[in-house]
Image (cartoon, rainbow, N blue to C red):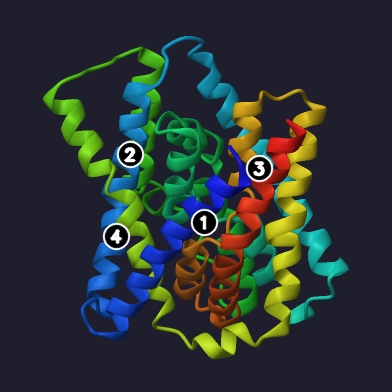
Amino acid sequence: MSGGVVLEVMIKLFMILILGYVLCKADVIDEHTGKHLSALVAKVTAPLLVVASALGASAQNRSRALLLIGAGFIMYFAFIIFGRVMAVLFRFPKKSRPIYECMLVFSNNAFMGYPVFQMLFGTESIFYASMINFAFNIYIYTYAVGRFYSLSGEKSEGFGLKRLFTPGLVLTLTALIIYISGFRTEGVLYDIIYMVGNTTSPLSMLVLGSTLALYPLKESLTDINCYKFAIPRLIILPALSFMVCRLLNVSDFYTGIITVSNGMPVAALVLMVANDCKADSEIIIRNIVVTTALSVITIPVLVSFMGRVI
């Protein structure tokens, strides 16, 4: 796909994000409504989109999903090392380094990634992307929680299965079972799942826009540290991901998914987990705003580069 087409896709998504921002400022979407819409996307529409993509995915080579999950766990472990190294190289404040590390590990795949994957690679790519990022849920409720509690000075409540098994993860596991079992369906059931799941793109961007409207935009856009952070988050990490995929002879399809996935802005869930752990969330808010805005430029450039090399 050419850079121009990708830019058009990103502009469309960004315009919906701006609409969400405006609707929030106009009190059409308030904070209460935004939270419920966010829960709807995270717990229902995005997971159902994964299920729909599993129902439509090719049943050949079913062991591929397990291979992607395993590769994803290795990938996220590598991200942890990457985050530690970048936090030192870019000289982020020592007291805030755990925050920067977590923001480098976890990218916004559900709210912004899924809409982009669907438009760039087709609905089927959503399932494969969810398998690659299956480890996201495990690491964010173990690694990220531990890092944030180390900042707050409070004792971690430990790892709980109840915290891990969210509706989103359960439906993702359902999609995995569907794919491996070879079960496929057409007709009314599939149409309903696909229709509800297909609302993920507009809803997620509206929610993201309304969420950003709740925080000081000027302070975020004038913070030079946010732009410094954007270099490893939006440029270095996806570039390294692309090079590793090429070295390992990963197919163009999966290389594209992994590279774009790892070039996404900071995950909104990082902010939610930080709030739960009573860690300072101001840095996260500012970097979510800046990396989301910059990704409209960096993702088309990234895809255009891949198109010339692949």
Separation (CA) of disc 3 from disc 4: 27 Å
Split into 4 quadrants, where in the image is the C terminus? Answer: top right
Q: Going from the N terminus, do you reach mark 1 or mark 4 first?
A: 4
Give x and y (percent) for residue 31.
29, 79
Residue linked to disc 4: 39
| Mark 1 surroundings within 10 Å by alpha-carbon count, few (fewer than 14), some (14 through 19), many (20 or more) | many
Q: Residues within 10 Å of mark 3 (few under 14, many from 20)?
A: many
> What residue does disc 1 label?
108
Residue in the foreground of this view, choosing between 169 and 248: 248
Location of residue 266 in the rendering, given as x and y in whole percent from the top left corner: 57, 63
Please tell me which residue is depicted at 51% across the width and 10% down the height of the picture. Answer: 61
Circle 3 residue: 259
Q: Earlier in the sequence, mark 3 or mark 1?
A: 1
* N-terminal-most mark, 2 or 4: 4
**Which residue is disc 2 drawn over?**
49
Would residue 63 be seen by someone viewing this image from the given angle?
A: yes
Query: Can I make out residue 159 in this image?
Result: no
Q: Amino acid at mark 4?
A: Ala
Q: Is residue 256 above or below residue 112?
A: above
Q: Amino acid at mark 2?
A: Leu
User: Residue 292 lies in what quarter of the image?
Assistant: bottom right
Q: Which of the image's four quarters has the N terminus? A: top right
Neighbor class of circle 4 (other Cα within 10 Å; few <14, some 14-19, many 20+) is some
Check disc 1 and give the amino acid type.
Asn
Return the residue nearer the eye: 138 or 176.
Answer: 176
Residue visible at 30% across and 14% down in the picture: 183
